[in-house]
Amino acid sequence: MTSLWLDRPDRFVSDPFKPGSRYHTVVAGAGLTGLVAALLLARSGQDVLVVEARHPGAVTTGNTTAKVTLLQGTVLAQLARQYPRHQVQAYVDANREGQAWLLRYLEEQNVPFQRRDAYTYATTPAATEKLREEVSAATTAGLDVEYVRDAGLPFPVHGAARLAAQAQIHPVEVLDALLSDLRSRGGSIATGVRLRDVTGDRPCTVETDKGSVTADQVVLATGTPVLDRGLYFAKLKPHRSYAAALQLAEGQEPPPGMYISVEQPTHSLRDYESDAGRLLLVGGHGHPVGRTPSEKAHLEGLLAWAGQHYPGAVPTHTWSAQDYQPTNLMPFFGKLPRGRGHVYFGTGYNKWGMTNAVAAALGISADILGGQVPWADTIHHRITSPSGALSAVGLNAGVAARLATDWGKVAGRKLRKDTPAAAAPAVPAEGTGTVDGGTGRPVAVSTVDGTTCKLSAVCTHLGGIVHWNDSEKTWDCPLHGSRFSSDGTLLEGPATRNLPRADKG
């Protein structure tokens, strides 16, 4: 599965990573948060290094549907139920500034983007109440959102919230511009380098799998923080959702705006002008990471929905992305607890990273450079609401229950197979994977492209039992969202190490 945005020749050349070097700031992660923060710091005269474990845009930024909008489903209504008005206003102000900075930057760099009206729509009468609640919360926060009956979709709706003149982008083209600009200002980016730890005081030691460097500050822009200080893995719900680009049948056109449904499963739509004509991009059908019998069924459900409303549409690309929903619905950014004042982070954008990521980068860079951003101060000083606290309790109770259940299943399989005739794990069929406990410890066994790999089934973060993802042929941890390729290579999440081979512990 390769996203529309990442399906292009890889011409990126890494800068050298030089162990023992000294920098003002090291940024971990070459997505939108990391590169905007790095550029802002380099503009101020700092010597900045970005380290990226894979390649720019490899995780969320390169797999988004890339809507740059202040109308974000029913987010504002949800926030208004938990927070006082000034906190909701701070969220809107942060996203407004993030959007304005990004679009202004794209204009300056001659990177194309398209203006589109954004819609949140309801297909059932019951869901229109959520729409009206969103319109109320948005207008209270100063957004010119209106309730409309017709959203321009090829299927009936019972109403929609509309915010005019929002934007959509090609996210990897945005990263290209940021990378070029960063390098022109003396910054560097080293790919294939994974941050493992940050130790000591200023200058701190930044430990990676390729050696160590020192820096005055470190910015973690890794989706979810890869350092466990602050326990943010316990405050975030990892979700995967699916997307597809579709070539429409002759005579069909994508709808004129950007859309997302109120009802579940979520359905998101936008267009994209490709060399082959205008494509329709659809997204949705998400689920908690590692907690579904079949990821492939979610993608198939999304494609079936698209085919129902656009008969004859042919997929050109399918992909998925991972997002993190904070238990209290407000993003986290700023100084990482127990980071001795020199480790910063951003996370919890709740599927609306194109504006929240830039806002987080603006807030982080202001903290580092001694600036003050009123909306950031307000967000930093929020108090977790009772519902947010209950959500966190429920999340972690569910994690604990899942951990116990999965290990119990493994133990049960071991007891059933723990006989003198117990055999090694069977070789799975092509494209499949299983977890086996019959040989004394949980083993993850898969066969992909004719190669069978046997790995430890225990996630290297906090010991969850991994789950086979039948759509992407990966091992996904249902506890906190770490993901590994079929050969055990770490892809994303709070883990920092690969799954070891089963014969190496």
Image (spheres, rainbow, N blue to C red):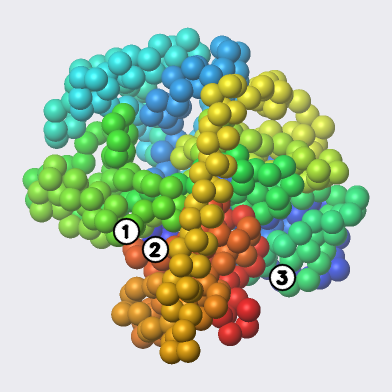
Relative to 206, is 489 on the left or the right?
left
Q: Quadrant of the N terminus?
A: bottom left
Q: Amino acid at mark 1?
A: Ser
Q: Nearer the viewer, mark 2 or mark 3?
A: 2
Residue at 25% in and 60% down: 316
Name the residue carrying label 1.
294
Residues marked 2 and 3 touching at CB (< 8 Å): no
Quarter holding residue 265 = top left
160 to the left or right of 442 = left
Q: Find numbered disc 2 in the image and state the secondary structure of the residue it sits on.
A: strand
Q: Quadrant of the C terminus?
A: bottom right
Marks 1 and 3, how far apart in space?
33 Å
Residue 297 is situated, as x and y percent measured from the top left of the image, at 27, 56
What's the residue at 60%, 61% (across, down)?
Answer: 463
Residue receiving disc 2: 469
Q: CA distance from mark 2 to mark 1?
A: 7 Å
Question: Camera-side residue: 368 or 243?
Answer: 243
Residue shown at 58% from the left, 22% from the top:
386
Looking at the image, tell me whether mark 2 or mark 3 is earlier in sequence order.
3
The residue wearing badge 3 is: 209
Q: Residues within 10 Å of mark 1 (few under 14, many from 20)?
A: few
- Kindly identify the amino acid type of the residue bearing the numbered disc 3: Asp
